[in-house]
Image: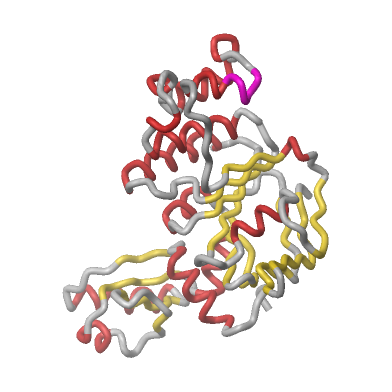
Amino acid sequence: MLLSIQNLTVRYGADTALSVSSPIDIEEGDRVGVIGSNGAGKTTLIKSILGLVPYEGAIRTGLRPEQMAVHMQFNEYTDAMPVRYIMEAVLGTKIARDKKLQELIAFFEFGDCLRKKYAKLSGGQKQRFTIIMVMMQEAALTFYDEVTSGLDFETRQKLVEKLVEWYRGKKESLVVVSHYYEELDQLAEKLLILDKGQVIDYGSKDELFRKYCGRAVIVVSHSERNEELLSGFRKLSAPAHLIAVSCESEGTEKAVTELLQRNDVNYKRSNNDIEILYTNAKAAKGGQTDGK
């Protein structure tokens, strides 16, 4: 076991910011996505694991502090010198003599940015800079907190693709906090769902999807016509502009898709839609937490 969290409580004054009752275990090679709205306790969870906030309960790990790395949502560096010198000073190495650092700079296409000062970097370049700094630690467990926050869609997509490619096949464990569902779909194999400081559930994406959504989900745009067409099937909670139908069996899925095709309705079929999963996990709990 790489890390185990048990009976964890974090309070800020009289308010409980995070409460974990059932154990959360992270194994070597795990890719854990943490999802929840603002104030759900996502960053508080990371800070408690890193010992940055006081807590009650137990966080057990065989890792030393230097075996854990973190990319926080907000990072700032001095603007008095080009970033290559900041990089070398913080990492205690020289780019010209460090093959691993050279590999990361090339992989993230950061070479042309080394002469710039930090304030002159774009949002995407700043994120690539801090990711390189984090990856150079070669940590057994790395936390990424909103790693693409503030970036446009295309920049986010390219950065996530780089992260996926870099970690493919590696044994390092990742904990990724993000409010972008597509990022968690690409980076995470397990999900920790938080809401208002409480754990809704924790487990593999596939298991949680089947638990809350069924074998598959058929999604169509919301309209009175589509509501009437699908009135005989079990609907799931979904964003207001969509209708989501749960398909518990292959027969149900066939019946739904044939009905939609006959009526010339466009649809999307999914067995891993994290937004639908997240929405229905919260709705299903109705105040219950920790998957109970």
Point out residue 189 in the picture as x, y percentages from the top left corner.
57, 53
Query: Looking at the image, what colour scheme do you see?
Result: secondary structure
The residue under the point 61% across, 83% down is 287
Image quarter of residue 168: top right
Q: Is-magenta flag for residue 198?
A: no
From the viewer's perspective, is 258 left or right of 79? left
In the rendered view, tell whether residue 118 sits above or below residue 31: above
Q: Residue furthest front?
A: 80
Point out residue 179 in the picture as x, y percentages from the top left corner.
47, 59
Residue closest to the eye, 15 or 203: 15
Q: Is-magenta flag for residue 90?
A: yes
Point out residue 260 in the picture as x, y percentages from the top left corner.
24, 76
Residue closest to the eye, 46 or 222: 46
Residue closest to the eye, 215 or 103: 103
Image quarter of residue 57: bottom right
From the viewer's perspective, is 32 left or right of 76? right
Q: Quadrant of the C terminus?
A: bottom right
Residue closest to the eye, 122 or 70: 122
Dominant SS in magenta:
helix
The residue under the point 40% across, 23% down is 116
The residue under the point 54% across, 62% down is 35
Stretch of the chain drawn in magenta: 88-92
The residue under the point 55% across, 67% down is 39
From the viewer's perspective, is 261 left or right of 110? left
In the rendered view, tell whether residue 135 sits above or below residue 55: above
